[in-house]
Each structure stands twice: as C-alpha cells, then as structure tokens.
Image (cartoon, helix red, strand yellow):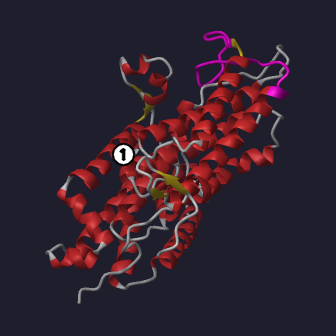
Amino acid sequence: MGRMSAATAVSSTGAVAVRDRADVQRQVKLAVVYGLVLVTLLAFALTTSDSTVWYTLEERVNRKESPPVEANGALVLWPAVAVAAVAVALAALNRVPRSWVGVVVHGLVGVAFFAGFLVWVYADQANAGAIVMTNPLPGTIRLATPLIFGALAGVLCERAGVINIAIEGQFLMGAFFAAVASSLAYSAEMGLVGGVLAGIGMGALLGVFAMRYLVNQVVLGVVLIALATGLSSFLLSQIPNDPDVKQYLNEPLILPRIEVPVLSDIPVLGPTLFNQTLLVYLMYLCVVLVSWLLFQTRWGLRVRSVGEHPKAADTVGIKVNRIRWQAVLLGGALAGLGGAYFTVGSTGSFDNGASAGNGFIALAAVIMGRWHPVFASLAALFFGFMWTLQAQLAFLDKIPGELLRASPYLATVIAVAGFVGRVRAPAADGEPYVKS
C-alpha cells in the first residue's frame, strides 16, 4: 500500500481523498502572501496620522488647468485592509480556485496593496506645498513598451526552442541604428525601420550560431550582448562631434504623440492608452498579432511543436530549423522595435548603454508570463509600473531613495523566484535539432 500524503479529506461517501502536495503548498503560499499584505496594510492604516492626500488624474500637475483634488485616504486604507482580510480567509479555507476567479482575487489584493501603499506614502504632508499624487498609468505604458516588445521576442524564440538571452543586445543595436536611420532620413518613422533591420541582423547571428554551428545558446546570448555593447560603443565613438556631421548620424527625430479622436477623451484610460506615439500603438498590435499567430494559425502550431518535440514534428514533415529561423527573425524584428524606443521613441540621441538592462527585465517577463505573449506583456506592464512608481516617489522621504531605485529589480526577483512559483519552459528550449 502506497504512502499517503498528510493532507487528506473525507468525502461524503466516507472515502479518504488525497490532496495533491502542490495544492497544499499553493494554499500555504497564498495564505502567507495574503497575510503579509494584510499585516502591511494594517501597519499603513495604524501609522497614518493625517490621511488627507492630494491627487490629480493628469500625468503632471497643472494647478491652473486641473487643480488637484483633496481626498480622505482612510476611505481607501480600511477597505484595502478588508479586501486583504477576506483574501486571507479564502486562502485559509482553500477557496481561491485556479480559474479566472482566482486571478480576480489576486488582482484585487494587488490593487488593494498598491492603493493602500500610495495613500500611506502621500499622507501626513503639510497642506501647503503638499506633493500631489499623479496618474502613473501613461508613464507605465510608455516605460513598458520596450519591455513588451522584448518579451514578445523572447516568447517567439523560446516557443520555437531557441533561448534568446540576447534581447539586451538586440535592444542596443536597434536603438543605435534607429537613431542613425532617423538622422539620415530626417524621419522618426524611418528610425523604426532601422531598428527592425538591426534586430533582424542580431536575430540572424543568433540563428546562425545556434542552429548552424550548434553553439550553447545561453553562452551565445551573453556573447551577443557583449558584441552589441562593444560594437555600439565603437560606432558611437566614430561619430564626430562636429554638428554638421553629427546631425546626419545621431540627432534623430522623436516620434510625436498621436491623439486618437473620441477614444482619447475617455476619462483616465483615454489619455493613458490613446494619446501615445506610433511605437506604442504598434506594441498594442504586436501583442494581438503574436497571440493570434501562436495560438490561432497553423504556423503557430508548428512553432509550438518544434519547441516541445522537434523530432515528432520532423516525422510529420515539418521543417524544424526553418520554423525556428522564422520565429527567431520575427523575434529579432520585435526586439529591434523595442530598441528603437530608447532613441526615436523617447530620448533622441543614442548614448552608451541606452537600454540600461531592460533586456534582462524583458527576459524575466517572459518567465513570469510563462512563455505566453499576453501574460508576458502583463508582467512587462507590472515592471513598467514599478519604474513609474519609483520615479514619482523619489520626491517623498518616507522610503530611502536607494531602495526606490532598486525596487524594480527587487520586484523582478520576487516575481520570478517567488510569486510565479514553478514554471515549465518549452521541453526542447535550448536544444539544437540535428536531423538524423
């Protein structure tokens, strides 16, 4: 007779039903996480003396056009505590399902925590000259744009069985050549073309060494990042400081914002989603496109099959390496668009290290999103929100600035190592295929 798990339950017929150990671990983890959220929110509520906060739904404070609104933060703090308490009770009773209902519960707890945290941070200020809470959503969308492009690139490559550690390198080369193309053509849109071509070039290098010469793909990704870092730095050093020459090589035009009629007038969400640049609108399209390609087309089925069981795919006539090449090059194009954000999409001129490690955060979003384009995009949005929050809270003194600057990376580590739990990559991810 086999050994039974300690976690058992008696059914209505008197039989003993054995619970899966993973289910028990999930229940304990949820109870602990929700409990920590509850304790933290209680601490926020009890340590706040004056819960008055000032906020505006605009991205920036403009006291003449849209004066800030005074609000009682207690009306947010205590309901947030109540939401966390209910979640703890549900977790303790194992009533948080794995379906969409569970996702809603997780989302409510997350929103409750962030709302309570923001009230606590902005509370207890003198009314005169109080720092106003602004809308973080527009900045979140912009900062998450390159992360989403990078995450989509990683999902495409790894679903096909090719590990793409080199997203950071693709960002760098995309940013550099986007700046050059835009400067030469006097067009920000041509900068996007330059970024795409550079990303495809880096994807081609990844494909050649990973599939033709069977180089270890993790090591290859690190080498490609080093190559992109050194090459972009060298090319930048070759651009003279003479303004008459520099204007043709590293003074790109920046993409203007495009306001969508009617939709941009929707309160809160309108300015957030529909008053953005062309690159952001392309990001929306690419999330839908990649999801459709992977899960609604024959090509997507072939991509997933060569990433899970390439030998079986080969036996039914699928050209494994051809499909992998297509996925890697398409991923490179998306990563090149992400790199273009760092020049024509935001700052303009290219500087050394323009991507600032965002490629690694995009890779973390791939893992956190379980190699699914929509979930990886949501993870990238979470990281973008953390960046925006860090920038806004830098003017307050309740949290040390060093901790604020490290918060996006801490959130990345916690999310990937703890919150997501066990994840399974595509079975053949990183394994070269040689036709026997």
Q: Residue at x 48, y 53 (%)?
A: 339
Classify residue 421 by image quadrant.
bottom right
Could you tell me the amino acid type at mark 1? Answer: Val
Q: In the orientation shown, which residue stands out farthest toward the bottom?
A: 436
Q: Does 399 sit above or below residue 364?
A: above
On screen, residue 7 versus residue 203, left or right, reads right
Q: Indicate whether residue 50 is drawn in magenta.
A: yes
- Residue 336 visible in this rendered orientation of the protein: no
Q: Position of residue 133 (x, y in %)?
A: 68, 24
The quarter of the image holding the C terminus is bottom left
Give the percent coordinates (x, y) of residue 225: 53, 69
Query: In the depicted view, which residue is nearer to us: 142 or 403?
Result: 403
- Rendered location of residue 349, percent (x, y): 55, 48
Disc 1 target residue:
287
* Residue 306 seen anywhere in this rendered image of the structure: yes
Count numbered badges in the picture: 1
The x, y position of residue 10, in whole percent, is 49, 52
Magenta segment's dominant SS is loop
Query: Is 436 above or below relative to 5?
Result: below
Q: Quadrant of residue 162?
A: bottom left
Look at 22% across and 65% down and name the residue there: 302
Residue span colored magenta? 46-69
Which residue is more in the foreground, 56 or 172? 56
Vertical side of 56 occupied by 13: above or below: below
Residue at 32% x, 70% y is 308
